Amino acid sequence: MTTTTAITLRRARLALGLFLSALSAALALALATSPANAQEPARLPFTATLSNTAPLAFGMDQESVAAALSAPLTYVRGSPGNETFVVIRMVNGDGFLFRKDPLYLQFRHGRLTGWKGNWSRDWLWRNKAIF
C-alpha cells in the first residue's frame, strides 16, 4: 500500500468517525429533549385566531364601549338612542409610526348593534373636527 492510499484511508476513517459521533450526539439530544409521553398542545378555537381585536360585544351601552376602548366616543349622526359614533384609535403602523384609525360604532335603542373600521383615507377632508 502506498503512502497516499494510507493517508486517504485515514482521512476517510476520521471523517466517518466524526460523522457517526455527530449523528449519535444529535440523536441523543433529540431523545433527551422529547419526553416519551408528550401530548399534542391544545388547539385554539377558531374565534381566538380572528383579526378582530376590538374588545366589543353586541348589546353594550355607550359608557361600557368607551371604557372598553379607553377612548371617548365622538358623535357622527343619528337621533337620540340610534346614533353613530366614531372612536379614533392610535394603531401601530409601519415600524414605530402610529396612525389614526377610525372605528365607527352603530347604536340602536342605546345598545351597540355593529362596528366597522374604516381604513380608507378619502373621508379625511370631510370632518376635520374629530381629530
Image (tube, helix red, strand yellow):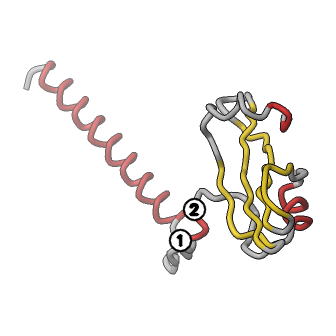
Closest to the observer, 35 or 56: 56
Under circle 1, the secondary element is: helix
Callout 2: SS: loop
Label 2 Cα crowd, 10 Å radius (few <14 / some 14-19 / many 20+): few
**69 lies above or below 125:** below
- For the residue pair 89 and 50, the one nearer the viewer reads as 89
**Image point (76%, 71%), residue name:** 108
Where does label 2 land, which residue? 50
The residue labelled by disc 1 is: 46
Q: Furthest residue to the front?
A: 79
**Labels 2 and 1 touching (C-beta < 8 A):** yes
* Residue type of the residue flagged with mark 1: Phe
Three-letter amino acid code of the residue under disc 2? Leu
The structure residue drawn at horizontal position 80% and vertical position 31%, both measured from the top left corner, is 128
Q: Is residue 7 left or right of residue 101?
A: left
Find residue 114 and report its horizontal and vertical position in percent: 68, 65
Q: Residues within 10 Å of mark 1 (few under 14, many from 20)?
A: few
Rendered location of residue 59, percent (x, y): 77, 76
Residue 100, percent from left and from top: 75, 36
Q: Is residue 95 above or below residue 62?
A: above
